[in-house]
């Protein structure tokens, strides 16, 4: 995971040399949003984890809790806790990235769906004119009634 983060950070630094100042500012904004969401999710998950542990161990005796604490301080317990922590951390990072990406996408969508800015008359394409009207035709002559034939 650390190698992946290092590669991503290196890639971002390389890209920043190629993109415009506006693009670099946008990258910085996205990084700030990601950091904010990561911190926010960590706080929520920490609180939820504490509540969950309090609920799960609510009926444990002092002896059982002491035994569990001793396990967590052992090599096996440290490995177990580290593995669980890494799993939760990876989950949080993916969740934060997803939330941040959804946020960025919503911003990009709002930017692209704004009405176009006012264009000066010189920049406007010419307005198409309707074709000239055809000359008016005279109304058709109504035939005169034919008198009935005499016998």
Image (tube, rainbow, N blue to C red):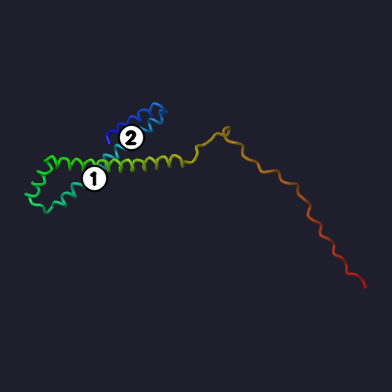
Side of 7 where 23 appears, left or right? right
The residue sitting at 71% across, 46% down in the picture is 133
* Residue 110 sits in quarter: top left
From this viewpoint, which residue is outermost toward the left?
Answer: 63
Say how many tags the image has: 2
Q: Nearer the viewer, residue 4 or 65?
A: 4
Side of 150 where 6 appears, left or right? left
The residue sitting at 32% across, 31% down in the picture is 9
The residue sitting at 57% across, 33% down in the picture is 123
Q: How far separated are the C-alphas under marks 1 and 2?
A: 21 Å
Where 18 falls versus 99 (above or below)? above
Relative image position of residue 11 (x, y in whole percent)? 35, 30
The residue sitting at 77% across, 50% down in the picture is 137
Label 2 Cα crowd, 10 Å radius (few <14 / some 14-19 / many 20+)? few
| Mark nearer the N terminus (1 vs 2) | 2
Relative image position of residue 56 (x, y in whole percent)? 16, 52
The image's mark for residue 31 is: 2
Contact between labelled residues 2 and 1, with CB atoms less than 8 Å apart: no
Relative image position of residue 41 (x, y in whole percent)? 27, 43
Q: Nearer the viewer, residue 95 or 68?
A: 68
From this viewpoint, which residue is outermost toward the front?
Answer: 76
* Residue 45 sits in quarter: top left
Secondary structure under the numbered disc 1 in the rendered image:
helix
Where the N terminus falls, by quadrant? top left
Relative image position of residue 87 (x, y in whole percent)? 24, 43
Where 110 falls versus 7 (above or below)? below
From this viewpoint, which residue is outermost toward the bottom?
Answer: 151
Q: Which residue is mark 1?
A: 45
Secondary structure under the numbered disc 2 in the rendered image:
helix
């Amino acid at each position: 995971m650390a190698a992946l983060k290092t590669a991503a950070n290196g890639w971002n630094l390389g890209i920043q040399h190629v993109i415009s100042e506006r693009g670099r500012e946008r990258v910085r904004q996205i990084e700030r949003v990601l950091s904010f969401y990561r911190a926010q999710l960590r706080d929520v998950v920490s609180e939820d984890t504490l509540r969950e542990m309090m609920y799960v161990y609510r009926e444990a005796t002092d002896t059982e809790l002491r035994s569990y604490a001793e396990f967590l301080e052992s090599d096996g317990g440290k490995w177990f806790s580290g593995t669980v922590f890494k799993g939760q951390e990876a989950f949080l990072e993916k969740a934060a990235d997803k939330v941040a990406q959804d946020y960025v996408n919503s911003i990009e969508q709002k930017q692209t769906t704004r009405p176009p800015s006012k264009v000066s008359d010189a920049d406007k394409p010419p307005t198409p004119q309707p074709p000239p009207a055809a000359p008016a035709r005279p109304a058709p002559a109504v035939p005169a009634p034919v008198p009935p034939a005499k016998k």
